[in-house]
Amino acid sequence: MQVGRKSCWRQLQASFFRLLCLIPTGFPVRSVDMQRATDNITIRQGDTAIIRCYVDDKVSKVAWLNRSNIIFAGQDKWSLDPRVDLVTKGQLEYSLRIQKVDVYDEGSYTCSIQTKQQPKTSQVYLIVQVPANIYKVSEDITVNEGSNVTLSCLASGRPDPAITWRLLNPSAEPLDGEEYLDIIGIMRNQAGRYECKASNDVATPDVKYVNVVVNYPPTIKKTQSSETLVGRMGTLQCDATAVPTPEFEWYRDEKRLSNAQGINIQILGTTTILMIANVTEEDYGNYTCVASNRLGVQNASLFLYRPGTGRDINGVACVSQSLWLLLASFACLFFKC
Ligand SMILES: *[C@@H]1O[C@H](CO)[C@@H](O)[C@H](O)[C@H]1NC(C)=O
Ligand SMILES: *[C@@H]1O[C@H](CO)[C@@H](O)[C@H](O)[C@H]1NC(C)=O
Ligand SMILES: *[C@@H]1O[C@H](CO)[C@@H](O)[C@H](O)[C@H]1NC(C)=O
Ligand SMILES: *[C@@H]1O[C@H](CO)[C@@H](O)[C@H](O)[C@H]1NC(C)=O
Ligand SMILES: *[C@@H]1O[C@H](CO)[C@@H](O)[C@H](O)[C@H]1NC(C)=O
Ligand SMILES: *[C@@H]1O[C@H](CO)[C@@H](O)[C@H](O)[C@H]1NC(C)=O
């Protein structure tokens, strides 16, 4: 009887302690060993966060809290979020794992521990970072010289991305602008490819481009008169800069010239060449080159001289070699040499 009672008591005692051990934590209790209080953990959106909490055998109860919500009490999951679970290594670790972290997970997480003496808590602040992403950028534009232009580049990210602009010309210096780049009275040399870069050091910066075309009226920047013997081919040349590409016309005094017998007009982009196949006495004199686009028109006078008049025939020194080659091949085609 005595023996029976004693063994029964022992059994009861044993199962009571087992219960005590099992119910709160599910594994033997240990005392706290956690990260420093109010540590920050930085994690990128979409990654898996493991918020560590280490325990030892003096701990009796453990829980994870998110703000004022209980996520886990011991092994008992209160959170309904399927992305959340526990990482337990042996019986020493009681860490919280959150998969596919999102921005709304940012905040403080508390590992709450009860030892025999007193409760302890340790807080970790989870910071969720998001790579910079340009979600809106200006479309390519065409404007007239002198216009005011505003380019926009809107980006998201955590922390807020810094936005910088460059014009991808050879110097590619940074421009003064953020989300909005203001260009007051745009000049032709400010045309080109603009780069907008959003960076926040989370991932490689996001980059987008805007092409800006600046229209301006023609300027005839170079003319080439000619001194040609009777019977030879005379050529007159005129170069203009303009956007859009200019249209050219040639005049002899008031009369418009066109491709006809003995006359050939070539237009190569921003250059035009008037070729007179077989110069006669009547061909000597004053010619006009007219360059126009929808923003304006400019004329220049050129001369076909009789040799020996000793004039300075060139508006500008010389015609480039490649142009002469082109010219020669056109002349050959046209005059069937
Ligand atoms: C945690 O981040 C906050 C800003 O979110 C900062 O003020 C604080 O100093 C950081 N704490 C540590 C320990 O890095
Ligand atoms: C933390 O709490 C917020 C609301 O308080 C909730 O939106 C978020 O999903 C929680 N995060 C986790 C990992 O439970
Ligand atoms: C361009 O901006 C300047 C300065 O803000 C202003 O004075 C000017 O009137 C604007 N020009 C046009 C065409 O809007
Ligand atoms: C040029 O014109 C003259 C007079 O019309 C003619 O005699 C000569 O044969 C021509 N030369 C060529 C190369 O066509
Ligand atoms: C040449 O012709 C243009 C247009 O017809 C005229 O304006 C200019 O004065 C002329 N130049 C000479 C030297 O005759
Ligand atoms: C030269 O330009 C003026 C306007 O600037 C125009 O009136 C004139 O007709 C042009 N001359 C020729 C030959 O086209």
Image (cartoon, helix red, strand yellow):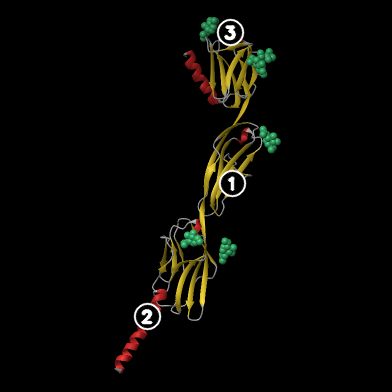
Label 1, residues with CA under 10 Å away: few <14, some 14-19, many ≥20: many
| Residue beneath disc 3 | 280
| Residue beneath disc 2 | 18
Q: Amino acid at mark 3?
A: Thr
Residue 222, relative to residue 108: is it above or below? above
Residue depicted at x 62% and y 28%: 216
Whether the residue carrying mark 3 lies under 8 Å from ligand 4 is answered with yes
**Marks 2 and 1, Cα distance to the nearest angstrom?**
64 Å
Label 2, residues with CA under 10 Å away: few <14, some 14-19, many ≥20: few
Which type of secondary structure does the marked residue at label 1 adopt?
A: strand
Which tag is nearer the camera, tag 2 or tag 1? 2
* Residue 277 spot, x, y in % from top left: 54, 12
Disc 1, disc 3: CB below 8 Å? no
Which type of secondary structure does the marked residue at label 3 adopt?
A: loop
Note whether residue 208 is visible: yes
Q: Which mark is residue 164?
A: 1
Which tag is nearer the camera, tag 1 or tag 3? 1
Q: Nearer the viewer, residue 55 or 212?
A: 55
Which type of secondary structure does the marked residue at label 2 adopt?
A: helix
Q: Amino acid at mark 1?
A: Thr
Which picture quadrant has residue 303? top right
